[in-house]
Amino acid sequence: MREALAKEPELVVVFGDSVKGDAVKQLVAFGDSLGIPVRYCCLVDYSNSRGAMDMGLLPDLLPGYKPAREPGVNAEQMIEAIELDALWVVGSNPLEFAPRQWRKTFLVVQEMFMTETAQLADVILPAASAYEKNGTVTNVCGEVQRLKKALNTMGTKPDLEIMGLIGREMGLAQVLGPWFPDQVFEEIRANVHGYNVPLPVLVTGGAAQAVPVNGRINISSNPDLIQSEHDTLFTSGNLGKYSKILNSVLERRTNVEPVNR
C-alpha cells in the first residue's frame, strides 16, 4: 500500500474519531514517509463544527486554538455538575439519549425543533435556520463560505440576535459588543489567526481557506473527550427526524428504519 500511494501525485487522508491521540501522530508520520503532498481531513458531526472549534468552543482553547488560562468544562461535565445554577443550550441536544440523568437546573434551550433537550427546558428560544440568517460557515477542511439569508421569517431570530437582545436587557451591551454578522466577522478576521481571508472571494460566492493552526498546540491531550454521534451521510441524523414534512413522506413510512446513530 505504501509503494502504491507513494506513486501518486498527491494524497488526501480522511479519518473519523476512531483515529485520535497518538494514532493521529502515527498517521501523519506515515503520510510524511511517502514523500508526496498529503492533506488530512478529520471528519466532524456538524457542517460548522470546524468553525465552532476555530472560534474557541473547545473547553481548553480560545479562538485560534490559543490555550485558555483557566480551562472550562465540556458538555458531559456540565450535565453531571451538581452545583450548576443554569444551563443555556444553543443548537445542541446533549440530553437526547440520557434525559433521566438531568438534574433540576434552570434550563434554557435555543433551538429550531422540539428536541429531547428542549422538552425539558424551562425557557425555549426559537432560533432561525442557516437559510434564515446571514453569516459564515467553515467546513471540515477549513474553507470559509458565506451564508446569505434566503427569506425573512416570523417567530424566530438568528442565534446572534437572540444573544444580543438578551445581553442588552441584562445591561451587558457594552461587554458583548456588536452583534451584527458583518461586524462580528470583521472582529474574527482581526483577532483569530488564519481568518484574515479575502472578502471578495466570500462575497462572490467562493470559499476562502482559513489556516488557524500551524504546529503543535501546547495543551494536554485528552482524546477520550472526542466523541461522535456516528450519523450516516444520508440522514445527517440530527435535525431531519424532527421535521413533520420529512416524516410525512412515503419513504419514511416504510418498514426500513434509518440508521442515524
Image (cartoon, grey):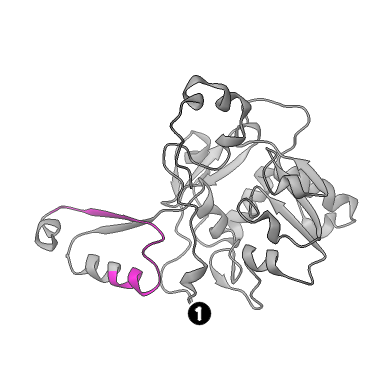
In this rendering, position of residue 129 left or right of residue 232:
right
Q: Residue at x 47, y 37 (%)?
A: 235
In this rendering, position of residue 242 left or right of residue 49:
right
Residue 172 at x, y percent in the picture: 85, 57
Can residue 179 be seen here? The reply is no
| Residue type of the residue flagged with mark 1 | Ser
Segment tinted magenta in the rendering:
8-26
Q: Residue at x 42, y 37 (%)?
A: 234
Residue 54, picture quadrant? bottom right
Q: Tell me if residue 16 is in the magenta stretch.
A: yes
In this rendering, position of residue 89 left or right of residue 7:
right
* Along the viewing direction, whichever of 98 and 178 lies nearer the viewer: 98
Residue 226 at x, y percent in the picture: 49, 64
The local secondary structure at tag 1 comes to loop
Q: Residue at x 58, y 39 (%)?
A: 239
* Along the viewing direction, whichever of 200 and 240 lies nearer the viewer: 240
In this rendering, position of residue 149 left or right of residue 84:
left
In the rendered view, tell whether residue 196 sits above or below residue 153: below
Can residue 33 be seen here? The reply is yes
Q: Which residue is mark 1?
A: 220
